[in-house]
Image (cartoon, rainbow, N blue to C red):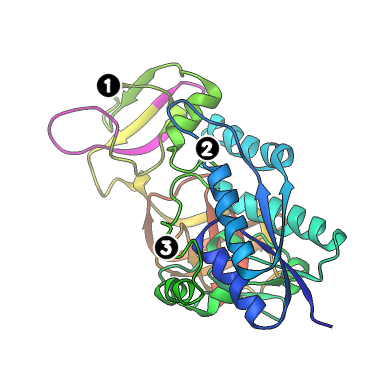
Amino acid sequence: MSKKVFVGMSGGVDSSVTAALLKEQGYDVTGVYMKNWSQDLPGFTCPWKEDYQDAKRVAVQLGIDFKMYDFEKEYRDKVVDYMVDGYKAGYTPNPDIMCNQEVKFKLFLEAALADGADMIATGHYARIQDGSLLVGVDGNKDQSYFLYRVTEDALTKSLMPIGELEKPAVRELAKKFGLATADKKDSQGICFVGKVGIKDFLLAELGVQEHGAIVDQHGRAIGEHDGALFYTIGQRHGLDVGGGLPYYVVGKDMSKNEVYVTTELNDERLWRRELELTSLHWINGVPALGALKVRTRYRAPLVDCELMISGDKAVLKLAEDIRAITPGQSAVIYDGDRCLGGGIVI
């Protein structure tokens, strides 16, 4: 009897092709739309209904069962509140990573298994091999960075078939299969609110913020910000301090409500050669210490590093200075093609 696989179908081309490939490979496929967010925001309509209909349309085309799981309450608790709380504390959290950890490879997996599935599948550009996570074949689209907090146990029950493909090939397959989503554009913006920018979302969640001073490298107040939580390390746009050389954000003090900037690209506050990580997660157990590689943001180049672990924290010594490392973001560690895990930068 063929294995029952529940495919997380978002209404996009990647998950549509995932479902089509698995059906072609002989799996007993059921499509599942995860309803994680449905709230409209000022000036923006949440696209969930359109995405749901697109996913359902593809399921009908493929002749597979289709259902919806409503995770909206849990998503709010585990992903949205985590993100909002992080920004309020002055960090720059990554909701996509938390979504994978808490929703797709935990809630969805548990619900699917309880519902009769043997495995789940997603449209991620990454590969799974014997419970390990490997980078996707398409280096430009590889999503292992966002998956580093998934457990080995979850990976043994998951499939990611398009991780073996490059994006243009996925588009071609969508056309070959005649899928309704073949020409649908990839979604942009925050994972759960479509085209809404993070600032608009935080304003809708938290309201107008208290203004405060923008302070330059000489300690002079040179302008006013509209809420320190909106600014990230390395940012140069949206500062509204005119004239002369561009300014870059190098820090902020949430208690003083100040944002610190510099015009000097070699300002030591813009560069780091050593990172401290907390909230460590290792996919296949604590790795052997020593020479590895690290990625400090999605699509950033891999940098040689040396890993040292002390209790629930780790220190990474980098082979070169990296610009604009942002507290709250993730540093993800690799050994060749294998993603080992990582932690949150502090």
Do residues under tags 1 and 3 come within 8 Å of each other at their CB atoms? no
Earlier-in-chain disc, 1 versus 3: 1
Tag in front: 3 or 2: 2
* Residue 196 position (above or below residue 218): below
Q: Image height check: is 333 above or below 50?
A: below
Tell me the amino acid under the disc marked 1: Gly
The circle on residue 299 is 3
> Which quadrant holds residue 157?
bottom right
- Judged by its main secondary structure, the magenta piece is loop
* Left or right: residue 270 compared with residue 209: left
Q: Secondary structure at mark 3?
A: loop
Crowding at mark 1 (Cα within 10 Å: few <14, some 14-19, many 20+): some
Pointer 1: what residue? 223
The magenta segment: 238-258
Report the Cα–Cα distance between label 2 and label 1. Answer: 35 Å
Q: Are marks 2 and 1 in contact (CB under 8 Å)?
A: no
Q: Which residue corresponds to the image point at 74% horizontal and 56% vertical from the top-left?
A: 108
Per the model, the C-alpha gap separating discs 3 and 2 is 27 Å
Q: Secondary structure at mark 2?
A: loop
Name the quarter where the N terminus is drawn: bottom right
Q: Is residue 145 visible?
A: yes
Mark 2 burial class by Cα count in 10 Å: few <14, some 14-19, many 20+: some
Amino acid on which the number 2 mark rests in the picture: Cys
Report the amino acid beneath label 3.
Arg
Q: Position of residue 161 (x, y in %)?
A: 60, 76
Which mark is drawn over residue 72?
none
* Left or right: 222, with 106 as reference point: left
> Residue 138: horizontal and vertical position, in percent?
44, 75
Residue 335 position within the rendered picture, expressed as x and y whole percent measured from the top left: 56, 77
Residue at the image position 58 percent from the left and 33 percent from the top: 84
- What residue does disc 2 label? 46
Q: Earlier in the sequence, mark 2 or mark 1?
A: 2
